Amino acid sequence: MKTQVKALVVGGGAVGTSIAYHLARAGWDDVMLLERDELTSGSTWHAAGLLPYFNMSYATTHIHDYSIKFYKTLEEETGLNAGFAVVGNLRMAQTQERMDEYMLYASTAETCGVPYEFMTPDEIKAKWPLIRTEDLKGALYHQTDGYINPADVTMAMAKGARQRGVMIERKWQADAFHWNGEAWEVTATKMVEKGGNLVPSDEQVVITAEHVVTASGNHAQRTAQMLGIKMPAIPVEHQFIVMEQDPELVKYRAEGNAEHPVIRDADAQSYVREERGGWILGVYEKNAPARFEHGVPDSFRADLFQLDLERIEDQYMAMIHRVPSCEESGLKDDFNGPICYTPDGNPLVGPAPGLDNMWLAEGFSFGITAAGGTGYYLAQMMVEGEAEIDMASLDPKRYGDWMTTEYAARKNEECYEHVYILHHPDEEREACRPLRTGPAYDRQKAAGAQFGCVNGFERPNYYGPLGAPDSFDHDARSFRRGGWWQYAHDEAQAIREGVGLVDATAFTKHRISGPGATAFLDWFTTNKLPKVGRINLTYALTAAGTTRTEYTIVRLAEDDYYLVSAGAWHAYDQDYLYKAIMEKEAEFGRINEEDVTTKWGVFAIAGPKSRDVLNELVKDADPSTVLSNKRFPWLSYRDIELGMCPVRAIRVAYTGELGWELHHPIEMQNYLWDQLVKAGEKHGMKLVGARAQNWLRQEKSYRAFGTELGRDATPVEADLPRFVDLSKDFHGKAAMEKIGVRSTCVTVLIDGPDDADPWGREALYHGDTRVGRLTSGGYSVAFGKSIGMGYVQPDLAVPGTKLQVRMFDKLWQAEIVSDSPYDPKNEVIRKDG
Ligand SMILES: Cc1cc2nc3c(=O)[nH]c(=O)nc-3n(C[C@H](O)[C@H](O)[C@H](O)COP(=O)(O)OP(=O)(O)OC[C@H]3O[C@@H](n4cnc5c(N)ncnc54)[C@H](O)[C@@H]3O)c2cc1C
């Protein structure tokens, strides 16, 4: 057995095998895979093998799309048939809301080039007469997907990998990981059979590997412990049953009819597919428990749990309703296996937090579907430094250190149960909340706040009616303009016309100081560093030249900086920043880093009357001038006092109005809140949530991280050249320049439907040609119509270009407008007083 390799993959399920294959295909000729038991002996062996395209995430849809295309090529390459039945996938809707969901999903599919068609109940009946359709509104049909044999496709990938030089070592368990400064030393133990169990023997080797990938499936908690990190990957029970033959189905097929597509009855939380003249029923039911929270017992190998028929009774009855001919079929086989989940249902794919050359591919709930694409894109990240799509939504660091086993287990149960609920884009899931709250939470709640959750932290989305029932926000959700829309509208208007107060405490905040800080930040970010007392918007790039993080940098003193970045990306930003500091400290001199995220609260006050409100509170020798342009110009920072609260005030407003961010000691938050609310009363100040803020920033064409800004576009493509100082050298510059401009970020005003706005997933057309996609969407109170931001091919990124946006399966007129359609000269932001 070789003991020195370039890359070691731990885990021989569908995912690990695909990664090993793709690393070899990407040119690494020294790859080894360790499997503690046999290949496919984890969750892979008992998967139903369905390959559903359906996913609201752009990255995941790309991953699924790659898999489906890749699996079709495997037989030619390896001679092994993976049993891919391209039967199609029929998603049925019992309600108009479900059809709305499919139409929104179709937008995502379309932007990824995934084919689909809508079908009416009559069309379904004519094609598949065994399906009952009278209670259906319609369906979404994917012609190109279907199901595959999970073990066979894994074996085909394993053969392909071996043909490309990968060494696959079975019955070897990775038991310890040690980074020696240059490579990982992985202690592996030979596993042996003992009384039906798989147990460690005395035989051990240490394998030195430049890179390690873990794809340990249900063993993720053990892997996390060995690595000293946290991973919210915990399995949940998942069941499917196989029915005896259905005589009607047998007859139907004997007449020469083609196999049924996978029939998904989302409103009944189940799917049905053919299996040798009978049917398989798979369910996503309520109350499926999390398992193995503290590790998989040695006695659990390729095992199953006991079937819980009672739990799936409703779905079983719904199946009989949908396919009445199966009523008499008996139960032939059952599967209740562990299926790994994460709190948001996306796997954890990418660099492990805090560790060099350690890559995770854990927490897969659709691992058969995702394996191919995960291998492909992860190999790109490892071999080339970046994937061609932005993998941030799958990044392991989207959960911070606050995450616990209990949180992950309960959230994963919720996520499982939610697989077939309506995926409203304005959904806020309820489990494990509230957990992380700022001091003003109770005051905001009493004022009617309806909260959203950012990185586990509660943040008002909008302020609804006082005393609203607990179900208010749930009932307000929609694929169109929901019950919250009017509240957000009024809040946005208040900021444009009067004054509003937003809680932005969730922001990520770091303080970087020391003799090496200036040189480091100058290298790390794209813009000129601000002068002392000033602020700048700037970007940290990936080595591939795309946007890794957006920062507002405040220069507190010569070598002392306060960095503010997106709240949702705390651990993600911190990991990149700290790793870069560690790498560069020797070159630039000592750099101190301090995470002050939870030390500072942030309120944003904005609107033409915001200065008037602050003037009521500000303490200064000359209070009438302290907030004037002369003493406190736009894009500067000052330490001020509001009543008894010391405030680091930053003159900037994400809403594009006259305004200040008020960074304050977290322990004084309630005091400051009360002072502001009281002073604001006289000026009609409104409490404002994140939804209104998101609309307002689009009127100013302010890009948001995670939508317009990410690892698939450079700041130049995001059309932000003013924040990129090409006269200096910075990390990722050469790569950014080499990329050029593949597509350009634009703002569009849309004449859309009367009852809906885009969500930022919709396809953009120019005539009959798809030319781009929206990344943000909403409503503009300034223009009285829908607004969006997105990317189009560069030659069309010209103000005045007429485009169309696909919403609800129709094309709506849209026009590209100059950046910052509201207050293009920044006059209101700079207003003196
Ligand atoms: C009933 C059921 C039906 C399902 N149906 C579908 C479906 O239709 N479509 C779909 O896409 N997905 C489905 N899934 C989910 C799918 O099975 C998983 O997402 C997928 O198998 C995960 O693959 P994996 O490679 O990540 O993990 P696994 O298959 O669990 O593989 C992990 C491997 O790592 C090995 N390992 C762990 N730790 C170590 C170590 N320290 N050293 C060496 N080896 C180690 C394990 O032995 C195991 O073989 C289903 C799951 C269940 C339970």
Image (spheres, grey):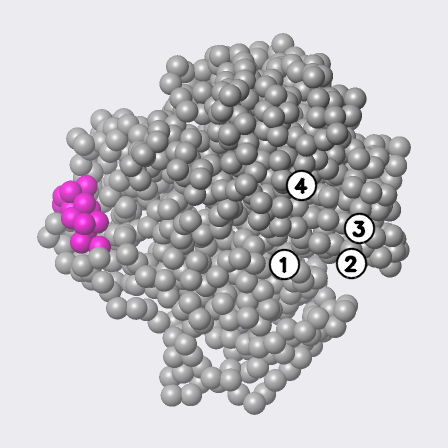
The N terminus - image quarter: bottom right
- The disc at residue 646 is 4
Structural crowding at the residue carrying mark 2, measured as other residues with C-alpha within 10 Å and reported as few (<14), some (14–19) or many (≥20) = few
Please state if 223 lies on the left or on the right of 23 as rendered: left
| SS class, disc 2 | helix
**Residue 394 or residue 600, whichever sits in front:** 600
**Residue 242 or residue 516, whichever sits in front:** 516
- The disc at residue 353 is 1
Q: Are marks 1 and 2 in contact (CB under 8 Å)?
A: no
In front of the other: label 4 or label 2?
4
Q: Which residue is mark 3?
A: 513
Of the numbered discs 3 and 2, the one sitting upstream in the chain is: 3
Q: Is mark 2 within 8 Å of ligand 1?
A: no
Of the numbered discs 3 and 4, the one sitting upstream in the chain is: 3
- The disc at residue 30 is none
- Amino acid on which the number 2 mark rests in the picture: Met
Instruction: Please state the extent of the stretch shown in magenta in the rendering.
Output: 312-325
Q: Quadrant of residue 289?
A: bottom left
Structural crowding at the residue carrying mark 4, measured as other residues with C-alpha within 10 Å and reported as few (<14), some (14–19) or many (≥20) = some
